Image (tube, rainbow, N blue to C red):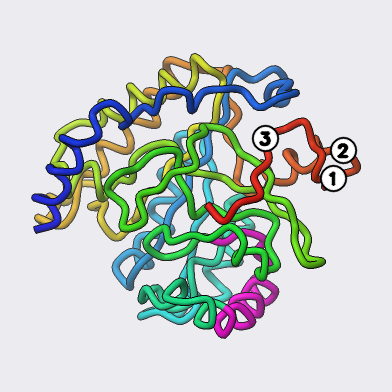
Amino acid sequence: MRRWLASRALRRSTDTWPILPGSDKEPEGWSGWPEGKQFAVVLTHDVEGQTGLSRVKRLAELEKNLGFRSSFNLIPEGEYTASSELRGWLTQEGFEVGVHDLHHDGSLFRSYDDFRRQAPSINRYLKEWGATGFRAGFMFHNLDWIQQLDVDYDASTFDTDPFEPQPEGVGTIYPFWVDGKNGRPGYVELPYTLVQDSTLFLLLQEQTCSVWQRKLDWIAERGGMVLLNLHPDYMSPANEAPSPREFSNLHYVEFLSYINQRYSGKFWNVTPWELARWYRSQLPQGNAPSSPLLTKTSAG
């Protein structure tokens, strides 16, 4: 059923996906990435279940071997326990740990009251884990509500993605600042700009990573942010044939190798927290809402 719905969404969105015209408009005052890099590469992973958790270290090692670092978003109260040992290992190896929803059951954004009730628990895990970033389950988002979370950045949006339950995108391939309200500080929003792995390989049943490569080339040419969300739950380990609910890890290896080979020395591979910290430093006085960089104030 989901594949049928995805095929319908694809037919309706050929003019806006995977590339949204106009999303490459540079923010006012944009001066480019650090050290003159052409574009940024941000790799993120949402770990949804026990299977994904068991694959975290292998995925991190794969990325390390190819010269990349990423972030792993872990569910605080899901079907697994995100141990302090694993979280510590990731940070020691140069990776980042983020908070992924609270229960990942779709209840967080069911209503404002639901969000308000769960926000203190999310903040407690953010503090306990030393995490500064958040991503909601199912990519639900309301930029105003998220201000109740003690985060430096949120990563629950996308430039364009008609396959999501809440398909309204933010229409940019750049990070942007969300102004604070009601005495709360603002935060940096990091939309993902490449289609998620589960959509590409499981719903649309693509047999190669060419869609990722084409969008990457387009973003690189325009100097934007390549942000990918990949799930270890759905990526089969090396030397194992993927099940019907998985895709081969060779697609990911090919994609990372493509970046290295075509754009060696031209991209900034950065964790979300590091990018958010850098972006915030570009704002007048660190967080002024009158920033010349891209800002948003609506709920989105």
Q: How crowded is mark 2: few (under 14 residues within 10 Å), some or many (20 or more)?
A: few
Along the horizontal axis of the image, is 21 left or right of 182?
left
Task: Judge from the rendering whether residue 262 lies leftward or rightward of residue 237; answer left or right.
Answer: right
Q: Do the residues labelled 3 and 1 touch (CB within 8 Å)?
A: no
Whole-angstrom CA distance, mark 3 to mark 1, is: 12 Å
Q: Residue at x 48, y 28 (%)?
A: 23
Q: Is residue 124 magenta?
A: yes
Q: What element carries label 2?
A: helix
Give the quadrant of the N terminus: bottom left
Task: Look at 39% across and 39% down and name the residue there.
Answer: 160
- Residues drawn in magenta: 116-134
> In percent of the image, x 69 and y 22: which residue is there?
32
Q: Which residue is drawn at 33% across and 35% down?
A: 253
Q: Which mark is residue 284?
A: 2
State yes or no: discs 1 and 2 in contact (Cβ < 8 Å).
yes
Q: Name the amino acid, label 1.
A: Ala
Mark 1 nearby-residue class (10 Å; few <14, some 14–19, many ≥20): some
Q: Disc 3 residue type?
A: Leu
Residue on which disc 1 sits: 288
Closer to us: 212 or 232? 212
Three-letter amino acid code of the residue under disc 2:
Pro
Tell me the quarter of the picture where residue 265 sits.
Answer: top right
- Measured in 3D between alpha carbons, the distance from the residue under mark 2 to the one under mark 3, in whole angstroms, is 13 Å
Magenta highlight: main SS = helix
Who is closer to the viewer here, 175 or 14? 14
Residue 143's disc is: none
Looking at the rendered structure, which numbered label has been put on residue 294? 3
